[in-house]
Each structure stands twice: as structure tokens, then as C-alpha cells.
Amino acid sequence: MLFNSLQFGVFFPLVVLLYLLVPRKMRCFWLLIASYFFYMGWNPKYALLILASTVITWLSGLVMGRVPEEKRKLAVAAGFVLNLSILILFKYFDFLLANVNTALRMLHLTVVDKPFDVLLPVGISFYTFQALSYTVDVYRGTVKPERNFFRYALFVSFFPQLVAGPIERSGNLLTQIQKLPEKKLWNYDRVAGGLMLMLWGLFQKMVIADRAAVLVDQVFDNYQMHGWFGLSVGAATFALQIYCDFASYSTIAIGAAQVMDFQLMENFDTPYFAKSVSEFWRRWHISLSSWFRDYLYIPMGGSRCSRKKRYRNLMVTFLVSGLWHGAAWTYVVWGGIHGLYQILGYELKGIRTWINEKLHTKTDCFSYKLGQIMITFLLTDFAWIFFRSNSLTDACRYIRRMFTKLDFWSLFNGELYNLGLDRPEINILLLGLVLLLLVDLVRYVRKERFDSFLKEQNLWFRWGVLLFLVAMTAIFGVYGPGYDAKQFIYFQF
């Protein structure tokens, strides 16, 4: 069930209405039923996988609460092995088998036949990591084992953030679920704020992301037909598409949870205003980057070790992060590029300082910070080419054409309108991006979310903005007869 579907438009109000009406002790059961129904909208059979992950990690937590400390490692290890085995089987089996067969062919040996076909379960990486973080938190003693299975099952499957995050921590979401009977469910300001966030998320998805996807698909699928201009526009547009697509899901999820008095963690904080790649990762997909920081990077030693080991820890973390995103070498290389960016950032810090001193560069002014933002965007945008390309070969050819097929005249001959979108569609996309820039500027400068900012404004301004977004989404949203509804990009991860 997609957030931008008619089914969800019916499902969500019904869930909230009954959530308000059922007895306090039944709220957890009702949300659990609704969450499984939501997930089963894709493939009912795969509900068994999320149930299995839930049972395994719940039992692992209970065991850790009852055995001596020296035996708790065995319980957490068992939970990790079983859950990661499920994840590897359904997400990485084909990738591993393909690479094994490639090695066998190079050795002129018989390839291994594929024993069965499986579809990638939606959101398996998200709920698996969320469940595994609980077992680590119990092992570390930061949370107590949850004895109520239904409360824990709701923590793993809570439908707003189930299939694409944010990847929640037990200390936040599970604690709120435990206090569910005590919640005061109706609060006008809270509900209105949640609906505002959902509206902004739908605008990002339907007006910007799905429209940008048309241009991106045309350029990346036919990169041999384009030169520097078209390929540069395609790469930059994909950077904006994936931001709006993924951030829109998180925004809708946070808004939907807020309507029901749940506070989910923020997942994006104006990432393209970052002044360095390391800052970018503190602002992009925060729930995942912080997960890898807390459960992989720091346990390996983090930065409190020698320079060589710190760089090793960084590279391993980013390579694993790339593999988490998808079972393909393109994602691994994308992660490796970001790891390399981080290492070079540390290594070149002294050189940058020396150059600034020699050139008497003002580092506290707007122009310097703008330059940092632009360079960071170009670096991340370059890496996105590997993320979006169908293969490493395509990515390398794409980049090579960018630098060898120079067509500067395309800046002036209307080539922009031959990249999959005509002039009116391009203008709508540009208008949407202007609104995105304004909203992100408010967030960046004033540290306020979209809903908080609107609540501070006069009534005429607030309703003017909301009605404008409703009209834009209804009139210019990408949907309707004959439209193949775009899934959120991160559903495949």
C-alpha cells in the first residue's frame, strides 16, 4: 500500500478513527492488526518473514534478560545470525550466486544453478535493522527486555515507518508503545501539524520526485544519446529526485505517526546545504547513518584509534552501507566513494587550511560557505551516478561521456525540453524546486520544520500555503488513468 495511493487515503482515516474509538487496552492490538494489513498489501506471504524476525529478536531479548551476563553474547549472536540469514537469503542470494558463477566461469568450472526464485520483500532491510538494534540495546542494558509480545511486534511493524523508515530505536518508539494506554489521543495542534507534514510529503513525492523521475529515466536509460549538458542535468535531477522521494516518505511517516501521538526521529535535515561530505551524512538518512555509527563504526573502534584503523573503520562502514542499499556492485562502489571522500577530507584538512592562509581567504563569509555547499553537492552528485546506473559499466560510460561529449551549445538551443519533459512540465518541476528550496531554507536558517513554521504564521498565510499545496498536488501531481504509480525508491532496499 503506497502513501500516494487511493487505498491509503481510505486506510489511514479509518485506522485513526478506530484508534480513537477503541478501548485504551486495545490500541496496541488495533495498530498491530492495521500494520500487518498495511504490509500484506504487497505480498501476504511475506508477513511471515517480519513475524519470524519479530519472534527471533523478541525471544533473544527475553533470553538475555534471564541468563548470566557471560551468556548474553550467545543470545544476541543467535539473533543476529538468524535475522541476517533471512536478509541474505531474500536480498543477497542472487547477487552472491552471480558472483560465484562469475568466478567459476573464469576458472572454466561448471556454474551453480539457481535453486529457487524469490522476490525482494518490501522494507526487509529496514525492519531487520530495527529489530537487531533492539537486541543490541538489550545486550548493552540501555533498554529492558520487552515481555509483552504484542507491544514488541508493533515496534517492529509500526506501519507509518515500516517499509522505508525512519529506522527507529527501541528507546524511542518502543517506550512510546509501552505508554500507549496513557496517551491523550486528540490534540488539534498536534493532529493539524501531522496532516501538514503529510501534505508537504505528498507534494514532494507527486509533484517533484515523480516528475523528475521521467527526466532521470530518459537520460540514464539513453545516456548514449546525450552529451555533457543532458548527462549533467540528468545527474543533478536524480540527486533532487532521490532526496524528494525518500524525504517525502519520511515526512509522511512522521506526520502520520504524529497524528496518532507518536514522535518518530527526524530522518533528513537539509542535506544539500551540507558544507562537507561528513556533514552531509549527518543530515542524510539520519536514522541509518546513526545506526551504522552506533552499531558498526563505534564497536569497531570508531575514531578513537590510530589513523590507519580509523580509515579502515570508515571504509568498512561505508562499504557495508552501500551493500545495505542494494545487492549490486554499483551500490558498493557508491558507498566506497563516500568512504574515500571521508578519508580525503581528513587527509586534506591541513592542505586546505594552508591554502586559505596563503590566499588570505575569508572562511567566515557567505561566499566561502556557498562554495563549500556547491562543492559538496557536486561530490555527492558524482557518487549518485553509480547509485542510479544499471551497472558499473553504464556508470563509467556515463561519466566518460560527460567529460568527452561537450555540447555547451545545448545551454541555449532548448535541449532541456528534449529530456523527457516538455516546457510546461519543466516549468512545473522548477516551481516545485523553488518551493522546496524555500522550505529547506526555513529549516536550515530557523531550525524549524514545515509544520512548526506554518503554525507561527497568520491564518491567511497558513491557509494560503496549504490550499496552494493541495491544488498543486491535485492538479499537477503525477497520477491518474494510465499512470504507473511510482513506488518510493527506497522500497527496493
Image: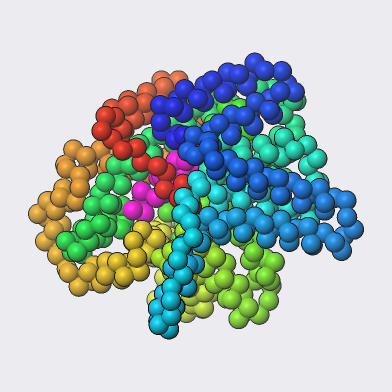
Which residue appears at 20% of the width and 47% of the height?
Answer: 420
Q: Is residue 353 visible?
A: no
| Residue that extends furthest to the right in the rendered view of this protein | 68
7 vs 69: above or below: above
Q: Nearer the viewer, residue 66 or 385?
A: 66
- In the image: residue 7, left or right of residue 178: left
Q: In this picture, which residue range is highlighted in magenta?
A: 238-255
Q: How many marks?
A: 0
Residue 137 visible somewhere in the drawing: yes
- Does 306 appear above or below 463? below
Residue 239 falls inside the magenta stretch = yes
Q: Name the foreground residue: 413 vs 101.
A: 101
Residue 163 is left or right of residue 483, and the answer is right
Q: Where in the figure is residue 349, as x and y percent of width and height?
A: 51, 75
Does the magenta run of residues contain 220? no
The residue at 25%/57% (across/down) is 221
| Location of residue 3 with respect to 409 vertically, above or below | above
Q: Foreground residue, 113 or 456? A: 113
Q: Farthest bottom residue?
A: 107
Q: How is the image coloured?
A: rainbow
Q: Is residue 237 left or right of residue 166?
A: left
Residue 273 is situated, as x and y percent measured from the top left of the image, at 44, 54
* Residue 245 picture location, percent across and down: 41, 44
| Residue with the most extreme top position | 21
Looking at the magenta stretch, what is its main secondary structure? Answer: helix
Taking the spot 56% from the left edge, 60% from the top edge, the residue there is 88
Tell me: 233 left or right of 355.
left
Look at 82% across and 59% down and name the residue there: 72
Q: Is residue 339 above or below residue 232?
A: below
Residue 268, percent across and down? Answer: 51, 48
